[in-house]
Image (cartoon, rainbow, N blue to C red):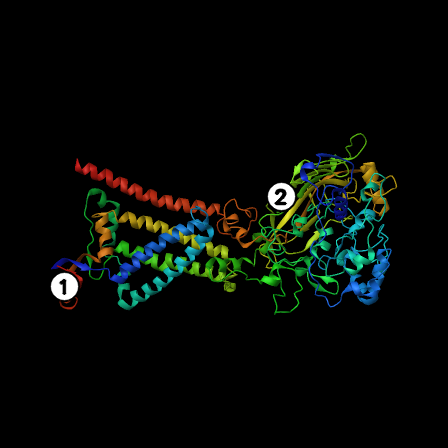
Amino acid sequence: MSHTVKLRVFKRFERLWHWSQMALIFTLIFTGFGVYGVHDLISFSDAVTIHTGSALILLVIWAFATFWLFTTGEWRHYIPTRKHFIKVARYYAFGIFKGEHHPYIKTYRRKHNPLQALTYLMVKTVIFPAIWISGIAYLLISFGLGDFLSGIGIGWIALIHTLSAIAIVMFVIAHVYLLTTGHSFVEHVKPMITGYDDVDLTDEELAYLRANEPNTIKE
Amino acid sequence: MKTLMFVSVFIALLLTGGKVIAEDEPKVEMGISEYSHTDQDHIQKTPKESKSTTDHSKLKELQGPFSSGPEVTKACLKCHNKAGHQFMKNKHWTWKHTHPKTGQKLGKGVLINNFCTNAKGNEGMCAQCHAGYNMTDSNFDFSNQENMDCLVCHESTGTYYKTPTTKGNKSCSVMFEGKPPIEWAKVAQSVAMPSRNNCGKCHFYGGGGDNVKHGDLSSVLLNPPKDVDVHMSADGEDFTCVTCHVGEGHEWAGSRYEMLVNDKVGTGKPGMPREVASCESCHSASPHSTNTIAGIKLNNHTKVVACETCHIPEIARGGVATQIDWDWRTMGKLKNGEGFKLKEYTQGDGHHRATYKSIKGTFTYAENLEPMYAWFDGTMRYITIDTKFDPSKGPIDINSFSGSHDDPNSRIYPFKRMHTTMPYDKGNNTLVYMNLWGNDGNALWGTYDFSKAIETGMKKNGIPYSGEWGFIKTYSYWPINHMVAPKKDALECAECHSKAGRLSHLKGFYMPGTGNKLLDIIALLAILGTLGGVLGHATLRKITSSRRKK
């Protein structure tokens, strides 16, 4: 027997992290494109200053987020799984056009669908590290501390940084688009604002939460 | 030939009482006198109070009477008994320089430039800017200390002048007549540390006129506004030349033969001698504020970009133009058998500059000119009289330099590039020494005959000559160091960090903002691909959902 209830899946820190990250990433994309030479809507000097400043703030947020993920055990949401994977992929490829409902409903232990979880995992373990490692290397060179990087050279570092940025832009486009699928755009965005989303709970989970964390459930 | 112009001051003063009104200057001026058009006043109006422990005017040795320069020099050397030995090694005296890296034998005495071409053999005129007396030809006695000219660098009245050491062609002889006699005792008693007047009399007029040669050294520096030169302006630091070109024992810092693009000695402790005339010698290699990210980034630039590149945004500022093109081919046109000048360029300060001179050809000027930028490691190589070149290979670089983005000792440096069409030895593929000045009937200035001038010039200096001459296009490159602008006028980042920026011709290294064509395509494909995929998916959803509704 399972119960679909409104559960607070995104903690306050997580939401703060998400939205500040969003704002910073948009700032970084805008200023980064300015530095790269795509537009001159902002002076090069300001673009560099804001880009560097935003990046440093984002690094701090990421450090907190990483700490949070591991200390709270939330990292388990991102472990890749085959369960429902094909089903969800099939939905996006075919089912969605036939008016089917999204086959996945969040569970207490898996707040992301398997495709989503894998994407976020790749973002967190490949694309983000690529951009912040290359970014830090770039900053070290800029701050005159990058002599040990002279074998690689700032050109390659910048290339990795730019390629990662392109990957992030692609992610952002897909990420925002997928919010329009399923129920509605608002339905998708709302949980990241309020924290609450529909989650399938087992009897035991429901009982546990009712007993121990009653304020995380809306009934 | 180096500079002659300082003499003009006195002529101009004499003729005009100190003022030449630009509007009164005729467009066509008869005669070949080089100096009547400038009114630059080299007389120091308010000499600074001397802090010297010796008042030279009180010395009995300097009471005179003196009747010549060497007599004054003799008096100087009586007390300054090491000055002669010191100055004997100085380039201003030797006109020789052996480059320590390339081993090339250089110096004014032998080099060919693409202005008046060669001083060698034309000492009768050019040695006005030799810090000595009686250099009439190439056989000057460089061991005779009494021929040293102490006054040209040290006198402070501004009334001292030099004239050509020989007469030259009769049409030239009028140039230097009618000047007041030098009051030797008075100028001798006025000696002081060199002021900008002393240096400027020659160095501001290199190439035969105000700012002609360097582009960053003009008479504007006698009293520049702060936006032209923060260091030399009275509203700025009010530096003289020797504030930066420091040294001891008549040897001082700064050479364009062997430049230091970065200061390895560093800024040193207070009071320590600074023996390098580079920006870093005073400002250090991290001169920008580290309180801002931009400042930190700028400090990081000093490893690859010379200070001058950003801080001298344009050359020939302040109203005095520099020459960028000289065409010798048109030399020798006369009006009624007489040489003339055509003054069709009006520069910023209102003065007309000669666009044509019978004795020199056609000139093109520029002001507020964007420099040329290149990687430079400080070492200049020269085409000398014995260098053979391939004339088919486009303009010949009279001086060339090395430097690269992967050389830690190179910096991106600003240059003025001079383009000149000038005579060369067509048979031997070398440059030529021309006989410009002389009263032998073979001097270019008077006969207007290249054949005679080249033949005589080559023969006189013992250089093999094929007998055939032609014209060749040449470039020369002049590193830019002076006329540092105020901070607010330094180049904006985007002047270089943009697709069509000032450095877009420099390739092979990473510079943000300049674009990367391959990466542009990858990014475009990736982003448009994603957008396309998303839009395709959305369109398909729309179509299928509307079908279902039916």
- The label number, if any, that marks residue A206 in the structure image: 1
Query: Looking at the picture, does residue B496 appear above or below residue A145?
Result: above
- Left or right of residue B473: residue B185: right
State the residue lying farthest toward the left: A1
- Left or right of residue B480: residue A144: left
Pick the front one: B537 or B508 = B508
The crowding category of the residue bearing disc 1, from other C-alpha atoms within 10 Å (few below 14, some 14 to 19, many at least 20), is: many
State the residue lying farthest toward the top: B336
The crowding category of the residue bearing disc 2, from other C-alpha atoms within 10 Å (few below 14, some 14 to 19, many at least 20), is: some
Q: Give x and y (percent) for residue A126.
A: 37, 58
Query: Looking at the picture, does residue B360 appear above or below residue B385?
Result: above
| Mark-to-mark CA distance, 2 and 1 | 82 Å
Residue B306 visible, this angle? no
Mark 2 = which residue?
Answer: B367
SS at badge 2? loop
Q: Give x and y (percent) for residue A128.
A: 37, 58
Chain for mark 2? B
Q: Give x and y (percent) for residue B477.
A: 67, 48
Q: Give x and y (percent) for residue B452.
A: 84, 38
Pick the front one: B242 or B281 = B242
Residue B6 visible, this angle? yes
- Left or right of residue B273: residue A15: left
Quadrant in the rendering for residue B282: bottom right
- Left or right of residue B46: residue A190: left
- Look at the image and tell me in which quarter the N terminus of chain A lies: bottom left
Query: At x 66% / y 62%, what residue is drawn?
Result: B276
Q: Foreground mark, 2 or 1?
A: 2
Which amino acid does the dot numbered 2 rest on? Glu
